[in-house]
Amino acid sequence: MDEPWAAYIDVQGFKAHWGHTMAAFRGLNALMEAIYRIGVNVYPDEEKCLLCYQFGDAFLMTSGLHERDLSRAVLITIAISPPYAEC
């Protein structure tokens, strides 16, 4: 494999908390902050940057370069997954 990768991450239960505005945005904010911190602290170089796009209550993360394997995508996804996430 020598292609860019993408990971789509959706906040589960966002709609159930929508009536409680702050509760709805806490999970979204935590996910956004985790992605931001990984991008800034772990991949600060422009050539290895982590690209992230927000779509409502979901995020699409992708690499800024072609990669030989999916190890970076897998490690980032595991790092931002809460310990109670359902698989």
Image (cartoon, helix red, strand yellow):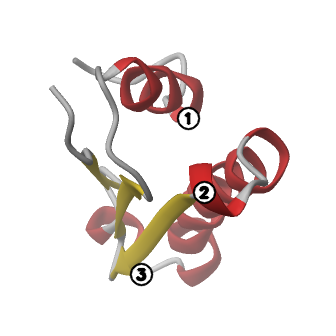
Specify the amino acid type for callout 2.
Glu
> Under tag 1, what secondary structure?
helix
> Which residue is disc 1 drawn over?
80
> Under tag 3, what secondary structure?
loop
Distance from Cα at disc 3 to Cα at disc 2: 42 Å
Q: Residues within 10 Å of mark 1 (few under 14, many from 20)?
A: some
Left or right: 60 as drawn, with respect to 50: left
The one nearer the camera, 21 or 61, is 61
The residue at 66%/55% (across/down) is 30
Viewer-nearest of discs 3 and 2: 2
The mark nearer the N terminus, 3 or 2, is 3
Distance from Cα at disc 3 to Cα at disc 1: 25 Å
Left or right: 57 as drawn, with respect to 39: left
Specify the amino acid type for callout 3.
Gly
The residue at 76%/39% (across/down) is 42
State if disc 1 and disc 3 touch (CB < 8 Å). Answer: no
> Which residue is disc 2 drawn over?
47
Q: Is residue 19 above or below residue 14?
A: below
Specify the amino acid type for callout 1.
Ile
> Which residue is disc 3 drawn over?
19
Residue 41 x, y percent position in the rendering = 84, 45
Q: Residues within 10 Å of mark 2 (few under 14, many from 20)?
A: few
The numbered mark at residue 20 is none
The residue at 44%/59% (across/down) is 64
Quadrant of the image for the N terminus? Answer: top left
